[in-house]
Amino acid sequence: EQRAAPGANIVALHSLARTMPRLAARALALIASAQAFYLPGVAPRDYMDSDKVEIRVHKLSSPRTHLPFDYYSLPFCRPDNLVKQAENLGEVLHGAVIQNSPYEVFMGRSEFRIACRVELTKAQKITLSQRVRQDYRVHLIMDNLPAATKMIAEMADGTKKDMYDRGFRLGFLGSKDIPGTEPTKPYVNNHLRFIVKYHRSDTFPGSRIVGFEVEAYSVKHTYEGQWDEKSPKLTSVPLRPDLAPMLAWSNEIVYTYDVVWEHSPIAWASRWDLYLYMGDDQVHWFSILNSLVIVLLLSGIVAMIMVRTLRRDLAEYNSVEEKEELLEESGWKLVHADVFRPPQQPILLSASLGTGMQLLAMAVVSIGCAMLGFLSPANRGGLLTATLLTFMLMGVPAGYCASHTYKALKGTEWKLVTVLTATLYPGAIAATLFVLNFFIWGQQSSGAIPFGTMVVLLLMWFGVSVPLVFAGAFFGFKAKLKDPPCRTNEIPRQVPEQAWYMVGAFNVLMGGILPFGAIFIELFFIMTSVWLQRFYYVFGFLALVLLILIITCAEMAIVLCYFQLCNENYLWQWRSFLNTGSAGLFLFGYSFVYFSSTLEIMGFVSTMLYFSYMFICSLLFGVTTGTIGFVASWWFVLQIYGAVKVD
């Protein structure tokens, strides 16, 4: 064995001491340069006067159908050369088709322009009128900011605050309250006013765009003589309130737009604040407080069980003098020779636990990254893309958890349990989505997943997730197991007759009430974000809710497992998984309440999509909460039976 000489060590330390200040200076320089960029988005772009500002079209969407469409599927003005922008995986799954537009906007120029005149066929009239009746909204993008409709919300203290609603309405239905319209007739918004907000500062040249508002109007334009493409002469300009609106069922539509520039004190780094504003934070704090009350209640019960009841039980069971008396009594110690008996269907249980651990790890990593600002809404589709990639990469903990559990349950078919962990739930969900994709494709929606994207997802699944599950399973089977604290008898003990509240569905459903109650209020905001197409960006609250959910599931599972063992029912493995897993049933039941009270979904396909997606979400949520309950119960059983002196 060679050792360095003492003199060489002194020289090395002296050299290190001299280089440390330089390394520190370089590190500070890197930190300073990193702070010069806006971490949760792209780098800002500075526009000089008269620079062209590009507007891109995004998609058409509606909270009533949830079937997105390509912008140019309707009779709108088209540019001479249509250029499609590359989308990431999340954007494709959201149905986005980002393309250039015919709108010409130049920095600092406030002007009125005619986009084009479109003659409509009968099929185009029918489609346009139908989209207006379905309450579709148009989505545009300028400098990576989505077009928004400005709203003024009144706060609880009486103050008013500006808020943004994504996109702008394609049109509206006439009513008696709107002058110049016929009731129930569809009208199209054919004039757009782009209100572009910019910010200037001495720290950078030019201007930066910090807001993109759109005001949509319906105007029946008139013109002199025959339409001249080069120099049309509109008689309906300037716009006046007495002008008639534009019927969607018209032979021709003239599209116009004007641009208004407004200086704003909002800095570029804060330009997303109005988009991401989600109302009063007091509601979220009330949600956290509500969940904390549940956690404190359960913690008190668990503490009482662990400290008082278990301590008394252990003292009695370990007392030599009272052992003969305890032989005739009942209690959780009497099933010590059966409590570690493998349950029925251990392969299915292990595969479910592996998938649950994969989903839980995915949720923790994704929410953690979003909370730190790495998944900005400026990166459209980034959250969905990151979630899918994280799920694929979490195959290692999935395989490890499934194989280690299966090994503890005395299983031997490790190949089968590994394959099921990697394919059972993902395969079932992929098959369901594949069938639903045919219905979306039948509606000619851009939300239908293209064949190329399906191939990419399959390659990610079989090329990344499945090998990682096998790698995790390898380490899980190789890991050493601790000997169980109690030996298992060859002949199983007969389970005595149980009370009505400890049998079947009632006991299982009782275990899911409190975990669902812990997330109930925050769940409303999440579903509103998904189904009413709002931004959701309070990931700090969501991280707290996730932590509370984990604690609630663990404590609820421990309490119910203790009561079950006290009733001499040692079949706790599946019961502990299903107890907290039944929170998924409550989530699916709540989806019916939300559908009838909040949503106005139209059509069979849209309704089927809603309930299918909610069923998938409920299933995955139930598997995740069930996994938490099983792991907590397993730990609890090992602790209490490890503390008992068994002959």
Image (tube, rainbow, N blue to C red):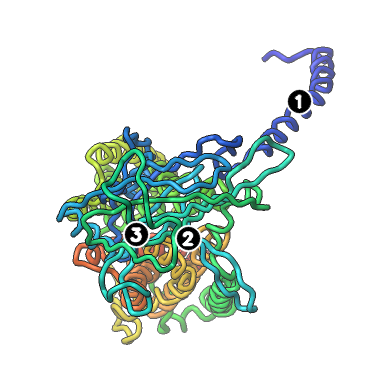
Q: Earlier in the sequence, mark 3 or mark 1?
A: 1
Q: Is residue 326 visible?
A: yes
Residue lying farthest to the front in this orientation: 225
Q: Earlier in the sequence, mark 1 or mark 2?
A: 1
Which sits in the foreground, 24 or 219? 219
**Position of residue 244 measured from the top left corner of the image (x, y, whole percent):** 34, 66
Which sits in the foreground, 452 or 583? 452
At a point 24% along the width and 67% down the height, the residue shown is: 607
State the count of labels.
3
As measured in the structure, the alpha-carbon distance from the residue carrying label 1 to the one carrying label 2 is 50 Å
As measured in the structure, the alpha-carbon distance from the residue carrying label 2 to the one carrying label 3 is 12 Å
Pointer 3 residue = 170
Pointer 2 residue = 149
Pointer 1 residue = 23
Which sits in the foreground, 534 or 428? 534
Secondary structure under tag 2 reads strand
